[in-house]
Image: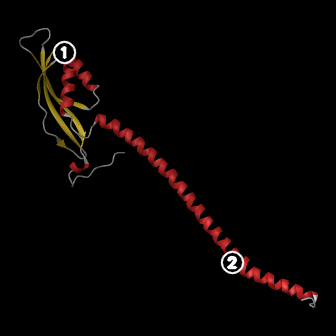
Amino acid sequence: MKNWPWYGYLILCLFIFTLVFFFYFRPKDRELKSLRAERQKMEQEVQSLKAKKLELDKIEADLVSMKANLKELEVIIPQKKEISEILRRIQQLAFDAQLDIIKFAPRGEIKKDFYAEWPIPIEIRGNYHNLASFFDRLSLFSRIFNIENFAIRSVQAQTDALTITSNFTAKTYFFLEESAIPPGAQVKPRK
């Protein structure tokens, strides 16, 4: 090699550089391009997942809000009948209003689309002011009650505490569980 001309060294360097370029740098360049493409793909997936996470967080917040709303509505219209609780509460309301319950005869439920009505015929004895107080307290009850078939009669043997009797039907409601909804019934979404 000592006898080589100067351009021989240059050719040797060029040959070594070409070998290094084709066997080392070019594969590394392809690997680098592949890694960059994979990185871009991963970044797009991350952005997509972040958007989905934000959407999921919003849905979860809506779900929490809807569950709280459902809890409030279940107080007004629960999912099942609570005969003993309703009887106890109505008796307490009548006692607080100084009325005597003569008859409390719950009837069977009347099924509607997604809820059922539950009529409860009641007969009460007392005076007019106390009856008004009873209805006022019943209106403040957490469940919905509608009063139907309301009638008042005066008592023949009047005392200060007993001047009238009243017959009425207190109708309350409860949601039907999905398994209790008839298969042909269509549940209409609420707006």
Give SS at disc 2. Answer: helix
Q: Amino acid at mark 1?
A: Gln
Counting from the top left corner in percent of width and height, residue 142 is at 29, 29
Identify which residue, 59 or 32, lies in the foreground.
32
Residue 42: x %, y % from top left: 58, 63
- From the image, which quarter does the C terminus lie in? top left
Q: Give me the residue at 16% from left, 35% from top.
A: 119
Q: Position of residue 66 (x, y in %)?
A: 39, 42
Residue farthest to the front, as pictured: 2
- Look at 84% across and 83% down and name the residue there: 13
Q: Residue furthest bottom?
A: 3
Disc number for residue 27: 2
Residue 113 percent location from the top left of the image: 24, 47
**52 shown above or below 128:** below
Q: Which residue is mark 1?
A: 98
Quarter holding residue 10: bottom right
